[in-house]
Amino acid sequence: MGRLTSTIDVVRARGQKALVAYIVAGDPHPDQTVDLMHALVAEGVDIIELGVPFTDPEAEGPVIQLAHERALVHQVTLAKVLELVAAFRLEDANTPVVLMGYLNPIEAMGYEAFAQQAKLSGVDGLITVNLPPEEAGPLAVALQDKAIDPIYLLAPTTTDARAGLVCRASRGFVYYVSLKGTTGSGSLDVTAVCERVAHLKAQTPLPLFVGFGIKDGATAAPIAEVADGVVVGSAIVTLMGEFEASPQALKSAVIELVRDIRTALNASNA
């Protein structure tokens, strides 16, 4: 059993819902990334989703696009991201790390070379935004050989037939994108999301996590009533831009936000 599955099982055994936090590696500066990862875990984050900077992050809204740009200023490549994961692992051998990014840097590195280095660095899962499961065969094989979980996305517009395919191809968990459009866009229709999540959960034994639109405890709690976990991204990344010049103020703001969401999740499951 991999670190991702075992962590989710532990969270379930506690009667809780998983909290996944997304940050872009190297944003606002690579020297802050590992410290922020540890701070997230200390405040109750169960899984870290680490964005891989890319020059054309087409699925992202303005907030996360700017985070990619801030990281790229410091030349944070895929290889550097893996170095940051390895540095995190020196003090944390338990918290799962899932990389989220685009296929292009992985192709440039090579599937086998990427999978090998990701395994050595301590990566547990991979979300490749622009790689549908129908076309993921060679990369999926490379990941499977290294026990790294491929995780695919479901959208509000995904048909039942394709949802079945996505769920069968995924490992660890399935990621439901609750909004149409890019990250950080729109506001949640909680009722519609809950109805859709309940419908999708009937199609897979895997945990189903909901991301996009989760920005605080108030938006996380009702979603957690039906989902197995929530992903918070743009709300955290917004703070990276606001407090870019002050690492300590940034860390404090991130801690306050994550603490609010963790508290709300725990209260909703009490």
Image (spheres, rainbow, N blue to C red):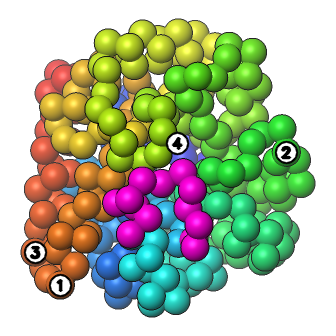
The mark found on residue 58 in the picture is none
Q: Which residues are magenta?
A: 54-66
Is residue 264 visible to the viewer in this orientation of the structure? yes
**Of pointers 4 and 2, the one earlier in the residue sequence:** 4
Residue annotated with mark 1: 245
Examine the residues drawn in magenta and state their main secondary structure. loop
Residue 92: x, y in percent? Answer: 41, 68
Instruction: Name the secondary structure under disc 2.
Output: helix
For the residue carrying disc 3, how many other residues have a C-alpha within 10 Å: few (<14), some (14-19), or many (20+)?
A: some
Q: Residue at x 35, y 52 (%)?
A: 233
Q: How far apart in space, not on screen, are marks 2 and 3 (Cα)?
A: 43 Å
Q: Is residue 49 left or right of residue 35?
A: right
Q: What's under tag 4, amino acid-wise? A: Ser
Look at the picture and state if 148 lies above or below 53: above
Q: Say which quarter of the image contains residue 80.
A: bottom right
Q: Quadrant of the N terminus?
A: top right
Q: Residue at x 49, y 63 (%)?
A: 51
Q: How far apart in space, not on screen, are marks 4 and 2 (Cα)?
A: 28 Å
Instruction: Name the secondary structure under disc 1.
Output: loop
Of residue 105 and residue 79, the one placed in the foreground of this image is 105
For the residue carrying disc 4, how many other residues have a C-alpha within 10 Å: few (<14), some (14-19), or many (20+)?
A: some
Q: In this rendering, which labeled residue sits more in front, label 2 or label 3?
A: 2
Does residue 63 belong to the magenta stretch? yes
Number of marks in the image?
4
Q: Residue furthest right?
A: 138
Q: What's under tag 1, amino acid-wise? A: Ala
Look at the picture and state if 63 lies above or below 231: below
Residue annotated with mark 4: 6
Cβ–Cβ under 8 Å for marks 1 and 4:
no
Residue annotated with mark 3: 249
**Of pointers 2 and 1, the one earlier in the residue sequence:** 2
